[in-house]
Image: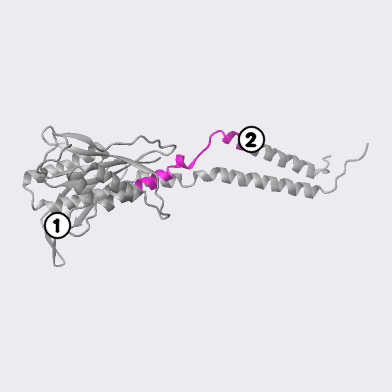
Amino acid sequence: MARMNEEGQWIVLMGLLVAVALFFLALIINQSALVGQTTAEGVLEFPKNDIRDLREAVFDYVDAAGALDPIERVDIEKDIITISLERKNAVVQFGNGTPQDVSGRWLRPVDIHYNNGVTVYNETVYY
Amino acid sequence: MVNDAGQLYTMEGVAAGVIMLLAAYIVVSTTSIYTTGDTHIPDMQLEQLGSDVLAMMDAPNTNGTTSALETFVSTNNGTGFNSTFLSYCNATTRGTLDNLHMSANITYRDANANKINEYPFVAPDNTWTGRESAVRATRWVQLPKLSPKPVGMPGDMRTDPQAVLVEVLLWRA
């Protein structure tokens, strides 16, 4: 029986190593679809647009408040608070104080509070 | 006595084992195909697009005038809202139009019964979404005193100044 030829074993082994490396790269491509999932979910979870929109609604309310009678003011405030709770699952509270002298300009302190169970946002802005 | 001949054969066997394990893993994992739609990345982009379009529509042309969004809601002009919204969000840099569709509801508060109600503003069309899910974008609109109340608005909606929520459902067909 002829003896087994043991020459060229390193060449065979290098070929195997290349095969293993190719499998590893295939694995990376396989997992690449996952990239960005947690980022996207984090962005979706964080109510950035809700908070921006609420601020704008409160500023609109403060702008218009001077021309409204007290009942209408309370009604608009109730609109924003109850619809936020019903449609956005967010507890919202806001109010404006009397104008104060801030560096020579008379600005109202406006309190905005927002809580949807995941994100809490509180702000006092001089508007 | 341990014989140290044929070590390369041993290494070859180990390499073959690793290859077989990897092959088995890849074969098993291909039964669940994970697409980009599952990662919510298009959802995130679509939601941001919808919010941006609503913000654009809520910006008045000049200081002190009424924004397009407020005009559409206070005159109950759902058709105009639909075409303006879709022309903004279907615009692409290539010039061809994107294939986004939308429907919209308006949520208001019935002050007498203190109830939250909603009415359809733009009815949905019959298109399929495919794999990507529809997303929701919302925008507050403060309406002035409505006199008279436009046709089509529900009877229990009050005519005094009020804040309503425009909710847009946006999907790619």
Q: Nearer the viewer, residue A29 or B99?
A: B99
Q: Main secondary structure of the magenta part?
A: helix
For label 2, the residue is B24
Residue on which disc 1 sits: A108
Residue A82 falls inside the magenta stretch: no
Exactly how many numbered labels are in the figure? 2
Say if the magenta span includes residue B34.
yes
What residue appears at the point 19 percent right and 50 percent down from the top-left corner? A58
Kind of residue at disc 1: Arg
For the residues bearing labels 1 and 2, Cβ distance under 8 angstroms = no
Percent of width and height locating residue A117: 29, 40
Which amino acid, by three-letter code, is at mark 2? Ala
Residue A115's quadrant in the figure?
top left
In this rendering, position of residue B38 left or right of residue B21:
left
Label 1: few (<14), some or many (≥20) within 10 Å? Answer: some
Q: Secondary structure at mark 2?
A: helix
Magenta segment, which residues?
B26-48
Q: Residue at x 85, y 48 (%)?
A: A7
Q: Nearer the viewer, residue B52 or B150?
A: B150
